[in-house]
Image (spheres, helix red, strand yellow):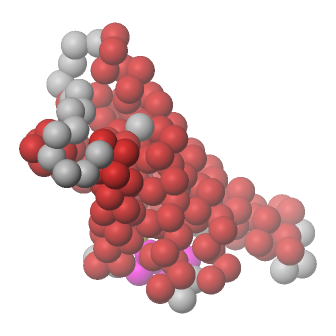
Amino acid sequence: MATNRTKTIITAALLAALTTVATMVIRIPTPTLGYIHLGDGMVLVCGILLGPGLGAVAAGIGSMLADLFGGYMAWVPGTFAIKALTALVGGWLYHHMVKREKMSTPLRVALCGIPAEVVMVAGYFVYEVGMELLAGSALGAASAAVLAGVPFNAVQGLAGVIVCAVLLPVLSHASAEMGQRIRT
């Protein structure tokens, strides 16, 4: 019989893989050469089900692998850091809310997911501006060019919050069946 530590590692690996798949399966291209996907929902699920620390690692690895497999090599380090931070913030807020408030799971997901997704949008803005600066653009021009992608990242973040609110009760039930209790 597997120990709790082994079950936790297996769960983290499964959630990282599901994050990769959710990011790669449905891709809606954007005019800014990126794409909108459902992986952000799994990023939040990682932070909530695994806790902010391990959830950040699983979300970062899963999202990074989607960029690696998808040929977005320049985004791999940024995606790892940004998605890990998104899961960290979402998971930390969720676990602090669950201790203090009696509210529905979807409302709690929205209240922790929206600030976490703001981190994602801001993180990609900063990363993209940095990439433009390294390519020789002036700061003003780089910021203006990157600003066009912000609404698409915001839509992706909102979709992630919705996906998490729908999937969390199902995945929480599944983890309870495996002997891991998650308060939702």
**Is 75 situated left or right of 136 in this image?**
left
The residue at 37%/62% (across/down) is 13
**Is 62 situated left or right of 133 in this image?**
left
Q: Quadrant of residue 147?
A: bottom right
| Residue range corresponding to the magenta coloring | 28-35
- Would you say the magenta stretch is mainly helix, strand or loop? loop
- Residue 169 visible, this angle: no
The residue at 36%/20% (across/down) is 97
Q: Could you say where residue 56 lies in the image, as x and y percent from the top left? A: 50, 49
Q: Could you say where residue 46 lies in the image, as x and y percent from the top left? A: 37, 49
Whether the magenta-drawn stretch holds residue 76 is answered as no
Q: Quadrant of residue 182?
A: top left
Q: Could you say where residue 40 lies in the image, as x and y percent from the top left? A: 39, 57
Quarter of the figure that contains the C terminus:
top left
The residue at 23%/27% (across/down) is 183
Q: Nearer the viewer, residue 130 or 140?
A: 130
The residue at 15%/46% (across/down) is 178
**Is 3 situated left or right of 172 in this image?**
right
- Residue 93 visible, this angle: yes
Q: Nearer the viewer, residue 5 or 137?
A: 5
Q: Could you say where residue 171 lies in the image, as x and y percent from the top left? A: 18, 48
